[in-house]
Image (spheres, grey):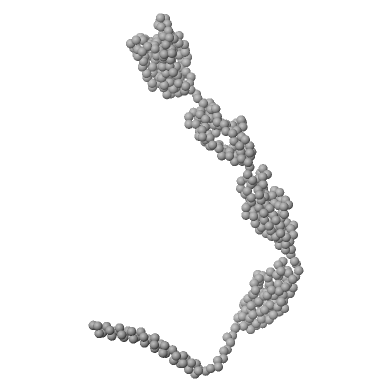
Amino acid sequence: MIIVLSFFTLFFINSKSSFAAEIPDYVGSDILYGAYGTGYKMSGIKTITDNDMNTSHTLAGDENSVDFKLSNYKVVGYSIKAYVDKNSKMRVTVGGSIKEFTDNGGVDIFVPVEQVLTTASTIKIESRQGKVYVSDMKIYEKRKMPPSDITDLNESITHDSVRFTYKLPTQDFSHLKVFVNGNLNTPTHKYDSFMIGQMKPDTIYTVKFVSVSPDGLESKGVEKVIRTLKEPSPDDIQDLKETEKTHDSIKFSYKFPKGNFSHVKIYRDDKLIANNVKVEEYIDKGLKGSTEYTYKFVSVSSSGLESNGVVKKVKTEEEPNLSKPTKPQNPDVTPKDRSLIVNLSDYDAGVPIKGYHIFIDGVRVNEKLVTGRSYAVKGLQNGQSYGVQIKAVSKWDVESDLSNVVTGVPKVPVVPEIVFDFGLNTLVEGIKNWFGGLWPIIAFSVAIPLAFIFAFNTKKLFMR
């Protein structure tokens, strides 16, 4: 045995460069290291798994195999160092992988095997013929590799936010860690987009995305330096209207802009009169009558930026004149069938007039203020006299005294009698003379077509 070991060891020392197995980069740790094997009669065989090239185990005769047991492991391959004697054969079984080696001398090989090994899986080295000297065997699990970084990183930037889009790794990936300016912003993010809000305008930020594997390994990370945009000025208010207007006040309504907006400032004739308006209406009071004012409504953002502003000129109503209108002139009354038409005319009342009230026998008959040029009073009796009066109403609802009474009498209009200065005989004679003048024209008009018809029929008679 000593001679064989010396020869075996000498073989691997002298031929290491010729037969050394190339181990791929993706393999991980040796899960068989230090495991004890079991033979036909022997147990506790450790010389194959001790990673010592100066020790080995001989497979021959009754002791022609050694078995190993492992718990649940996901493996990617195994390596074995052995010497197969002349006319000998070695078989290696790892789970569902079976590989045989014949009398080719030294064996130093890596065999890829991707499967999950359990305690029920077969792990065996055996001599199928002759002698086999096994120096070392390793079974590798997959190397724990950090995941790949995200790819195709793009960003969409505003003055107070940034939205990133990217492609996530497809293998060995669990989630992302997101860092902002070196601080962990989000420890677990699993989606292909990421939004950061409440950022400062015109400010540089460094954002880093680190991929994390299910085992907790981290990628190097992808870092992006961005600068937020300058904050835009807010939009102006919309639909500015004056909804009510008097001699001393004006009421405005409007719509606030959307987005970057906080409140409204209001100026009257370049003087700030309201600094923090947050409702969509405003009433300006204490104004002078018949006066034009220039208003400016300026939108303000949360950071204090201002819009260009909306300008509107408005003239107040004239101040009320509570003087009584002068007594109106007597109205002109036109009689109709069971009604009277009261005709109204302009006159100098001393104050602006907006309408009239109509009175019949001292009783007002109009429900609404009369603003037209005339008013029909209906439902009266023909032939009966009625006293008609009017009262003027000023622009400020001050009424004048009643006018003088004008009497009106409704009646049915009569067709006037027409007297003719000729008799019936004269009318008959005139009609006769008129037809007498037309008769030659009628006869001539009829005779010509009849002549043509007669000639045509005569021609047909002779041509038969």
Q: Position of residue 133 (x, y in %)?
A: 40, 10
Q: Position of residue 223 (x, y in %)?
A: 57, 31
Residue 271 or 212: which is nearer the viewer? 271
Vertical side of 115 occupied by 332: above or below:
below
Q: Position of residue 66 (x, y in %)?
A: 40, 13
> In the orientation shown, which residue stands out farthest toward the right?
323
Residue 92 or 71: which is nearer the viewer? 92
Quadrant housing the N terminus:
top left
Vertical side of 37 occupied by 270: above or below:
below
Figure quadrant of residue 183: top right
Left or right of residue 412, residue 273 in this image: right
Q: Is residue 118 visible?
A: no
Q: Is residue 222 visible?
A: yes
The residue at 36%/10% (across/down) is: 85
Figure quadrant of residue 204: top right
Vertical side of 297 occupied by 341: above or below:
below
Quadrant housing the C terminus:
bottom left
> In the orientation shown, which residue stands out farthest toward the left?
464
Left or right of residue 146, residue 453 in this image: left
